Image (spheres, grey):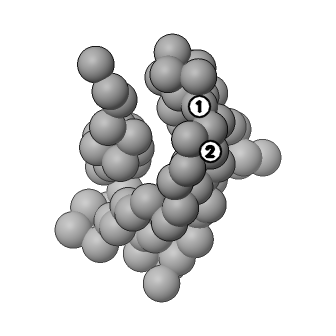
């Protein structure tokens, strides 16, 4: 069963932000071993998603990496605002 990384990231981020309708998660590139996913949030929510010292972003990456390991893939998450 394949992991839907976009949905996973959206489900992690949605309860953290004030503007959940502004969340945009898209796969930028994907090949056999590597997946690059871009997460865009409202500028006011960027701090909430990254967290103090990057703790929330690192925790989110750890969860996504665990799912990727089951599929022998590497996932890179880019977090930005618009």
Mark with earlier residue (2, 1): 2
Q: Element under label 2?
A: strand
Q: Element under label 1?
A: loop
Are there few (<14), some (14-19), or many (20+) residues within 10 Å of tag 1? some
Residue 35 image position (x, y, % from top left): 56, 48
User: Do we see residue 70 in this rendering?
Assistant: yes
Vertical placement of residue 60 versus 30, above or below: above
Q: Quadrant of residue 8?
A: top left
Q: Residue at x 56, y 41 (%)?
A: 32
Q: Residue at x 72, y 46 (%)?
A: 54
- Quarter of the image with the N terminus in it: top left
* Location of mark 2 (residue): 34
Q: Residue at x 43, y 69 (%)?
A: 41
Pick out the residue farthest to the bottom.
82
Label pair 2/1, CB-CB below 8 angstroms: yes
* Location of mark 1 (residue): 73
Foreground pick, 6 / 33: 33
Residue 81 image position (x, y, % from top left): 52, 76
Pick out the residue farthest to the left.
21
């Amino acid at each position: 069963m394949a992991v839907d990384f976009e949905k996973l990231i959206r489900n992690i981020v949605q309860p953290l932000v004030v503007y959940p309708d502004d969340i945009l998660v898209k796969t930028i590139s994907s090949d056999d071993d590597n997946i690059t996913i871009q997460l865009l949030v409202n500028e006011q929510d960027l701090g909430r998603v990254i967290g103090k010292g990057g703790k929330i972003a690192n925790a989110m990456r750890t969860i996504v990496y665990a799912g990727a390991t089951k599929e022998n893939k590497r996932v890179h998450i880019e977090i930005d605002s618009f």
